[in-house]
Image (tube, rainbow, N blue to C red):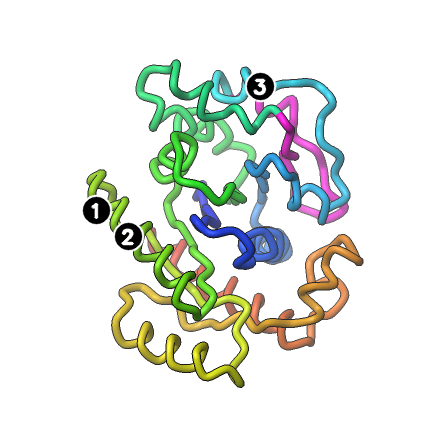
Amino acid sequence: MKTLACYSIKGGVGKTASSVNLAYLAAQAGYRTLLIDLDSQGASSFYFRVRPSKKNWGKRFFKTYEQLLKQIKASDFEHLDIIPAHESFRHFDALLSDQGKRELRLKRVLKGLKKEYDLIVLDCPPTLSYLSEAVFHAANMIVVPVIPTTLSERTYEQLQDFFGKHGLPTKMIYPFFSMVQRQKQLHKSTIERMQDDTPRLLDTLIPFSTDIEKMGEHRSPVSCFAARSAGGQAYEELWQEISRKLKKL
């Protein structure tokens, strides 16, 4: 079993859209996939028409994998299950602060799911926190959407700095460009510079696309209703690129 985290310090960069499409494409490829929506806003859950649990189960999340199994919901797609977000997830940091070896808690719990799933996809909230650290320790690979702008590039550099200061392996971080508008000179120059200077930068560029924006209207991955669109094809290419790297980990 492999764990793939989709993470960014900055919000609004296409993180949830990427999590949803990658989880869907993994399931379509035959991977028994579990998408865990760790963001209390619940956008991933919304896209898959999965309702959040009415019960507050945040306190039990990090205890045992049996507690997670009780919260798993089936999606409309074969091989794809969802653990929906809950408002109680806002308090994950407080929960983790009271636990010993908090940075390893999520990793230990997810290990219990290895018989049920081939791939776990984590849709992470845009923050640096105890939960983020737990995600960094649990993931085999962290994909980071970066809009080709100065601010988004800067937040990626902050993530790199955080890993360096905390002794975490930067080799697990794989950035990729998201919401790309090639007609913008800033996007073009940022892409060219980062392609020369950024280790492990993925080749696939996800375009700024009205079809991707319409995911909320359709409440489904873009590959379901616009697979041949620029956005749909880009996510297919991104999944192929990521899956090749996951197999080597």
Q: Residue at x 38, y 15 (%)?
A: 99
| Mark 2 element type | helix
Identify the amino acid type marked 2: Gln
**Residue position for label 3:** 67
Work out whether 110 lies above or below 228. Answer: above
Q: Give above or below for 31 relative to 82.
A: below
Find residue 45 and report its horizontal and vertical position in percent: 68, 41
Residues at marks 1 and 2 touching, judged by CB atoms closer than 8 Å: yes
Is 100 left or right of 210, judged from the image as shown?
Answer: left
10 Å crowding of disc 1: few (<14), some (14-19), many (20+) = few
Alpha-carbon distance for marks 2 and 3?
33 Å
Between disc 3 and disc 1, whose residue precedes?
A: 3
Tag 1, which secondary structure?
A: helix
- The picture places residue 147, in percent across and down from the top left corner, at 47, 66
Residue lying at 66% horizontally and 45% vertically, measured from the top left:
43
In the image, residue 80 lies in the stretch drawn in magenta: yes
Residue situated in front as seen by the camera: 157 or 67: 157
What is the three-letter code of the residue carrying label 1? Gly
Residue labelled with disc 2: 160
Within 10 angstroms of label 2, few (less than 14), some, or many (20 or more) residues?
some
Q: Quadrant of residue 35?
A: top right
Residue labelled with disc 1: 164
Looking at numbered disc 3 in the image, what kind of residue is underneath it? Gln
The percent position of residue 119, horizontal first and vertical second, equals: 51, 44
Residue 219 disc label: none
Per the rendered image, the range of residues in magenta is 65-87
Q: Position of residue 28 (x, y in %)?
A: 64, 56
